[in-house]
Amino acid sequence: MIKIQAESNVPTEYGTFRMIALSENENDWMPHMAIVAEKTDFSKPVNVRFHSECITGEVFHSKKCECGQQLDAAMKYIHENGGVIIYLRQEGRNIGIINKLKAYSLQEKGFDTVEANLKLGLPADDRNFGEAIEILNLLGIKDINLLTNNPEKVKYVQESNIHLNSRVPLQIPANEISRGYLQTKKDYFGHLLDDNDK
């Protein structure tokens, strides 16, 4: 069972958030996080973002993906409108940073993100959003507006006891390097993206 292990207010460049560490074990060095905006009204549909860890995009500002920019945009939106980011420790679609870098190396040889994972004998996407649902239940959130372009996340909510009030797009314009990555997201995973050449 996931439990709240620690929490504190943390001031950021987007505003102050209540950051909550959640895991089964209090000694877990990599717990999931719930990042709660100060003015969140839990009596109304709560704006929620399920965000999987991406050290390359968030910390090192990689141009191969839009993950860091999505996290920034989500923090800004949720600070302004209230809500919660569920930060899941699922690096590289849950294959880990070592395998992610191996996949990047294959991408340099012409494979797309899905082909690279499959060539390594890994799933195209091994993420599980069940723990995000568990965290929402733990926080007492029953009705949400989900910030996502990913139909798989929508499906997880629709098949849970959480009511999906609406989907809020969170699209980041493509750059010259991320364009192919975003196209693969759209073509292979069915992500709800507009033409990323715009």
Image (tube, helix red, strand yellow):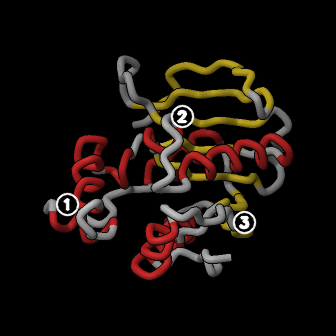
Q: Nearer the viewer, mark 2 or mark 1?
A: 1
The CA distance from mark 3 to mark 2 is 21 Å
Determine which residue is flagged by label 2.
33
Please tell me which of labels 1 and 3 falls first in the chain: 1
Looking at the image, is 180 positioned above or below residue 3? below
Nearer-the-camera pick, 193 or 160: 193
Q: Secondary structure at mark 1?
A: loop
The CA distance from mark 2 to mark 1 is 26 Å
* Residue 111 at x, y percent in the picture: 27, 69
Evaluate if marks 1 and 3 touch, with contact meaning CB atoms under 8 Å apart. Answer: no
Tag 3: amino acid? Val
The CA distance from mark 1 to mark 3 is 30 Å
Determine which residue is flagged by label 1.
122
* Residue 105 at x, y percent in the picture: 24, 54
**Label 2 neighbour load within 10 Å: few <14, some 14-19, many 20+:** many
Q: Secondary structure at mark 2?
A: strand
Looking at the image, is 137 positioned above or below residue 110? above
Residue at point 70%, 36% (across, down): 36
**Label 1 neighbour load within 10 Å: few <14, some 14-19, many 20+:** some
- Choose top left, top right, bottom left or bottom right for residue 130: bottom left
Tag 1: amino acid? Leu
Looking at the image, is 55 positioned above or below residue 148? above
* Residue 82 at x, y percent in the picture: 81, 44
Tag 2: amino acid? Met
Left or right side of 41 for 4: left
Please tell me which of labels 2 and 1 falls first in the chain: 2
Residue at point 74%, 53% (across, down): 47
Q: Secondary structure at mark 3?
A: strand
Q: Is residue 159 visible?
A: no
**Label 3 neighbour load within 10 Å: few <14, some 14-19, many 20+:** some
What number is the disc on residue 168? 3
Total tally of numbered discs in the picture: 3
